[in-house]
Amino acid sequence: MKLKLLFWLLLVGNVILFGLPRGYFGANATERREPQRLAEQLHPELLSVLPANSEKLASQTRSQAPASAPSASAAAPAGADPAAAANAAAPATQPPAAQVAAVTSSCTEVGNFTVADAKRFSEQLASLNLGDRVAQKLTQDVTSHMVYIPPQDGREGAERRIAELRRLGIGDFYVIPDSFPNPALRSGISLGIFRTEEAAKAYVGQLISRGVRSARIIARRSGAGKQVFQLRDLSPEARTALDNIKSAFPDQEIRACSA
């Protein structure tokens, strides 16, 4: 009797375990766990499992890829200007060139004034109220180039360099005196003055071949300098006013400069 009861219990349990996952007794286990996700499926009957190397899968992927944007050359009509085609292909949010120039910092340089003319120009320029956007600088023309050995350890260092130059067979030099206007060159050794930078560089090359490797080149400028005005970030109105002021100085020029 007990064996029969155990047999029927096992049979009923197997039937229940077989039927529950298949929905024979109502909602299956998956539906009980995720009813909302199952309800949100769109046309589940259209889904199919394809192998990774399926040709059908590859063709569907190619068909769903977004079409590439047409190139500028393809979009432009035959015979059109390439620059115009490039402009047509540019993003619509790109600002016009005039707007870019308006927000870009700029530097305007005026003249090579004598001291007297610079004073008159500065007085008229004051009416523009440019503040720290205007700077006045002194420029000097380069007249020659000096090949020299920089000073080190004052006169004692100069004497050591003189002895070394003589040992190398170089006798054309002189010690820059303490009365020299540029204090950074005092007690240095001048090896020659040249009219052009190219000639000075050529001589430095000769010195290197003879064992002198500390020679340098410095530009020598004229004592009488010229006054230059640099103005930054001028508005269109200020630039017009500047042109009017400059018209009283016909020998001067306006040019761009680095800010």
Image (cartoon, helix red, strand yellow):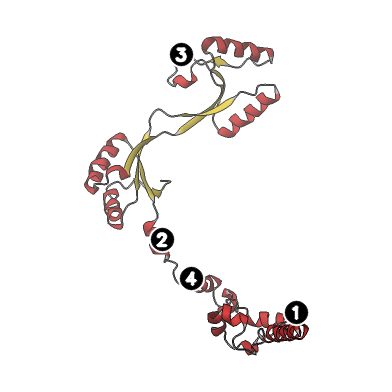
From the viewer's perspective, tell me whether residue 258 is left or right of residue 6. Answer: left
From the viewer's perspective, tell me whether residue 244 is left or right of residue 205. Answer: left
Q: Residue at x 73, y 85 (%)?
A: 5
Q: CA distance from mark 3 to mark 4?
A: 66 Å
Instruction: Name the spot of residue 1 as percent of width and height, x first.
Output: 76, 85
Q: Which residue is mark 3?
A: 178
Q: Alpha-carbon neighbours of circle 2 within 10 Å: few (<14), some, or many (≥20)?
A: few
* Residue 91: image tag: 4
Q: Is residue 222 visible?
A: yes
* Rendered view: 108 above or below 21: above
Q: CA distance from mark 1 to mark 3?
A: 92 Å
Q: Nearer the viewer, residue 45 or 102?
A: 45
- Helix, strand or loop at label 2? It is helix
* Rendered view: 72 above or below 181: below
Q: Residue at x 53, y 18 (%)?
A: 151
Which amino acid does the dot numbered 2 rest on? Val
* Residue 100: image tag: 2
Q: Earlier in the sequence, mark 2 or mark 3?
A: 2
Q: Nearer the viewer, residue 41 or 234?
A: 41
Q: Nearer the viewer, mark 2 or mark 3?
A: 2
Instruction: Name the spot of residue 130 as percent of width and height, x first.
Output: 27, 46
Q: Alpha-carbon neighbours of circle 4 within 10 Å: few (<14), some, or many (≥20)?
A: few
Q: Nearer the viewer, mark 2 or mark 1?
A: 1
Q: CA distance from mark 2 to mark 1?
A: 55 Å
Q: Alpha-carbon neighbours of circle 1 within 10 Å: few (<14), some, or many (≥20)?
A: few
